[in-house]
Amino acid sequence: MMGIKPMIGWNDDWTVFTLADAQTVADFVKANGIGLLSYWSYNRDIAQSSSGLTPINTYSGVVQTAQQFHQIFKTAEGAPAPAPAPAPAPSCIAGAASWVNGQTYPAGSVVAYNGLLHLAKYTNPGYNPTISTYYWAPYNCSNLSAAPACTSSLTAWVQGLPYAAGTVVSYGNQLYIARYANPGYNPTISTYYWAPVSTWVQGKAYEAGSVVAYSGATYKASYANPGYNPTISTYYWARLGC
């Protein structure tokens, strides 16, 4: 929760927090829904007929009536004016993982927060994207390509053709990845050598080289990642086949 706590009247650095300043702060607190408004100190908020450097531990040092600062700050009570409805979020945000406070994000991570996308410029332990602008930068839909560039094509399985471990083939309307090198065994029979390509799961940890299916396309993890969206986090994922 954010709060504001000024020192009323004369301050130790010789600046003066006036009654007009108090009203400005109270208006700001009410308009912005600040959760706490206090001041230093209530025992100095007493009547004074003239301004001057009276003992600042006893008086505010400005002309005022008794508890006048307190009465001004009380005007901050009540609900703030409703904020205008935010603009609809771009459709590309829908697939982005939401930012989580305290979660570690490697450089290159893309998250959604308050209807906007943010890119981690540096690895950080979950700093707020709208506050820690050293670690985060705004990221918008124009930064996103229609799809990551293809890094290899997908081919139909061919009986008797040697396949290296990690090869992805299509067979019977299903994609398979070779768990081990093999001389062209049937993917639906030789399940020791082949495994169906699984659907991407948000938040699931993936090792480098993992292959997933998402939104009608296939992606390979260029680097290990904690489940970033393949269509957004193109630093971590590369599209297979076009």
Image (tube, helix red, strand yellow):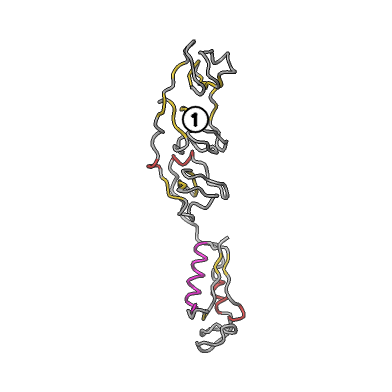
On the image, numbered disc 1 is attached to which residue? 214
User: Mark 1 belongs to which amino acid?
Assistant: Tyr
Q: Is residue 84 left or right of residue 45?
A: left
Give the crowd class for mark 1: few <14, some 14-19, many >=20 residues within 10 Å.
some
Which residue in the rendered view is the most extreme toward the top? 160
**Residue at the location (50% across, 28% down)?**
213
Q: Quadrant of the N terminus?
A: bottom right
Q: Is residue 242 left or right of residue 12?
A: left
User: Against 27, is 13 above or below?
Assistant: below
User: Against 23, is 195 above or below?
Assistant: above
The one nearer the camera, 78 or 92, is: 92
Q: Quadrant of the C terminus?
A: top left
How would you classify the magenta stretch by its main secondary structure? Answer: helix
Q: Position of residue 186 (x, y in %)?
A: 54, 13
Which residue in the rendered view is the most extreme toward the right? 43
Q: Count every numbered label the image shows and give the total.
A: 1
Q: Is residue 5 left or right of residue 20?
A: right
Magenta highlight on residue 47 = no
Q: Position of residue 90 (x, y in %)?
A: 43, 42
Magenta highlight on residue 25 = yes
**Residue at the location (51% across, 84% down)?**
62
Which residue in the rendered view is the most extreme toward the bottom? 49
* The magenta segment: 16-32
User: Against 132, is 153 above or below?
Assistant: above
Question: Label 1's element?
Answer: strand
**Residue at the location (58% across, 65% down)?**
36
Q: Position of residue 185 (x, y in %)?
A: 53, 13
**Residue at the location (46% across, 43% down)?**
108
